[in-house]
Amino acid sequence: MSAKSIAISFIVAFLSNGLSSQSFVSKTTEHNTKPIAMKDETTGVDTQEKAFSVFPAANELFCDDIRPQIQNIIDRHGMEEWRYGVLTNEMHGHLGIYAIIGMKMGLRALDELSADHDHIEIISYAGIQPPISCLNDGLQVSTGATLGHGLIRISDEEIKRPEATFIHDGKNITLRLKRSSWEKISQDVRAAIEMHGALTDPYWKLIRKHAIQYWAEWDRNEIFEIVKE
């Protein structure tokens, strides 16, 4: 049992105990696994982490419903999306649908603008009323354009929607969740309310199940439309 494994497991357990019960890092871990590192291919130096020495991806560190999807998410969407998906949902306090969509949208914008993390500005049209406003948490985590950095603002437009404008180096792009994807989310949320009532424990369990499915199956290169450049 290495000192590094103990340190990583301690931090993960601390995060999970300090957040909502809807977060998904397991509170019972084993320490005989080796997390996947995010390393610069040329130097071998970790270029992402600020607290972790390597970012965890070992099955034993995560809750039962997340474990079967870990490698699938990494293989389909990359280690970067796995990392920011984990951080988004731990910060958000539960595994939420629009937070996941915001995370994917932010990463897509960085790709489109060839921008680095912390070097982009955002105007969000998701408002400040959940559930759509949960998009904002994913946007902040995946891009580094946080309120604290003064790099994101919420538009006061009356119509709230899963859409944001991203600005970098004199260029801008506006991404919007495709109508078909938005309708799918709306149908699933309505069905959860009809089955279990709004904001009940069974409701949140079903929302969590949908969020995991969207995270694993929806490709950030396919679910958004470019409104303007």
Image (tube, rainbow, N blue to C red):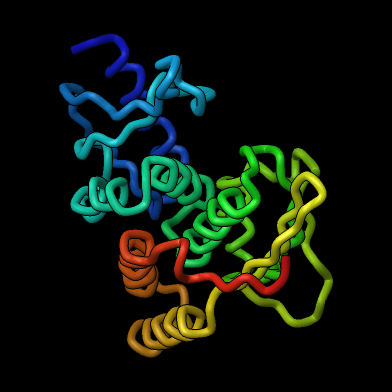
Quick one: 70 or 176, which is closer to the camera?
A: 176
Residue 226 place in picture, x, y as percent? 62, 70
In the foreground, 172 or 149: 172
Farthest-out residue, bottom? 194
Provide residue 214's location: percent of width, then percent of height: 37, 66
Query: Which residue is at the far top?
Result: 3
Q: Quadrant of the N terminus?
A: top left
Quadrant the C terminus occupies:
bottom right
For residue 160, side relative to residue 17 (left or right):
right
At x 23% / y 10%, what residue is drawn? 2
Q: Position of residue 59 (x, y in %)?
A: 21, 39
Q: Is residue 134 left or right of residue 22?
A: right
Q: To which quarter of the image does residue 25 belong?
A: top left
Task: Please determine whether, in this image, residue 39 is positioned above or below residue 97.
Answer: above
Say left or right for 141 vs 221: right
- Residue for point 50% across, 63% down: 101
What x and y, as percent, mark residue 122?
73, 55
Question: In this view of the protein, which residue sits in the foreground, 29 or 42?
Answer: 42
